[in-house]
Amino acid sequence: MNITLRIWRQPGPGRPGHMVTHRVDDISPDMSFLEVLDVLNQRLTAAGEDPVAFDSDCREGICGMCGLVINGIAHGPQASVTTCQLHMRSFADGDVIDVEPWRAGPFPVLKDLVVDRSALDRIIQAGGYISIPTGSAPEAHSILVPKDDAEDAFDAATCIGCGACVAACPNGSAALFLGAKITHLGLLPQGQPERDSRALAMIARHDAEGFGGCSQIGECTAVCPKDIQLEVISRCHRDVVTALFHHGEQQEGPPEDQTGGNLASGPAGD
Ligand code: SF4
Ligand code: SF4
Ligand code: FES
């Protein structure tokens, strides 16, 4: 196959960027999209030019590093795969393909196609953990988990933190990511001690990082490589409302909205 890539090139954070056309000939339809970028970079390097900066690590859909907007779609035209799992047989010989970084305020471009997604890490740091009592490991069957809860928790836990949901959301919301993390821990017995504080702290961090509110449009689920469902956003909403109610009971007054108003009219805010 011979293809033409129009790639966003940006020398650094806050610097102006623009699309640059690169032609790549003689590639196999069985190559992954990232392998084509590897081939392009080998040729650019051999010619003494600056290679295209892009993120990747596992290259098997696990780590969540490889986020690219390809022809306007986060992770490209094939559903339920990451960019590293996208193969050139999804395109036609002679195609012109636009390649851009995630576009979202909380994900500033570092260089070319690489963005800073540490805002998602800080949401996890705010509450995406459970307390671990020290001592010997408990007997495996000492805490029973209903099968449906275990399966739903596992589905939510498959979120790899890639950020495609943010890139696709017209509001720049990380509600699907947040919902997956809160659902994963909130469904399990081990996640109950911090359930209220987790929900309040994580949504407060989400808002403080500059992510937008959710109005349940569903663009996020369409691009999620792990098929995380909108239901996790509803679960997140319920956990936050319950936490606010408990907080209000403790204060012996009406629940106070600690979410910056982001829950006013939508599952994670409108
Ligand atoms: S919810 Fe899906 S799209 Fe969003 S970060 Fe997790 S895996 Fe990626
Ligand atoms: S449901 Fe819509 S508004 Fe909410 S996070 Fe997903 S894409 Fe954004
Ligand atoms: S490189 Fe790890 S998910 Fe794509």
Image: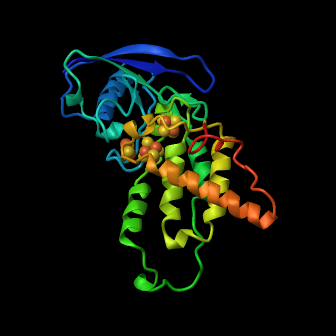
Residue located at (69% from left, 47% from top): 259
Relative depth, front residue between 121 and 25? 121
Q: Quadrant of the C terminus?
A: top right
Q: Quadrant of residue 241?
A: bottom right
Q: How is the image coloured?
A: rainbow
Q: Is residue 92 left or right of residue 227?
A: left
Q: Is residue 197 visible?
A: yes
Q: How many marks?
A: 0
Q: Is residue 65 visible?
A: no
Residue located at (43% from left, 14% from top): 20
Q: Is residue 47 above or below residue 115?
A: above
Residue located at (73% from left, 62% from top): 247
List x then y, in percent, for residue 213: 60, 38
Dividing the image into four quarters, tell me where ligand 1 lies: top left
Q: Quadrant of residue 110?
A: top right
Q: Is residue 166 left or right of residue 243?
A: left
List x then y, in percent, for residue 203: 63, 49
Q: Is residue 12 above or below residue 30?
A: above
Q: Is residue 154 above or below residue 146?
A: above
Q: Residue furthest right?
A: 252
Residue located at (39% from left, 41% from top): 224
List x then y, in percent, for residue 170: 52, 29
Relative depth, front residue between 202 and 231? 231
Q: Is residue 61 left or right of residue 136?
A: left
Relative depth, front residue between 62 and 80? 80
Q: Quadrant of the N terminus?
A: top left
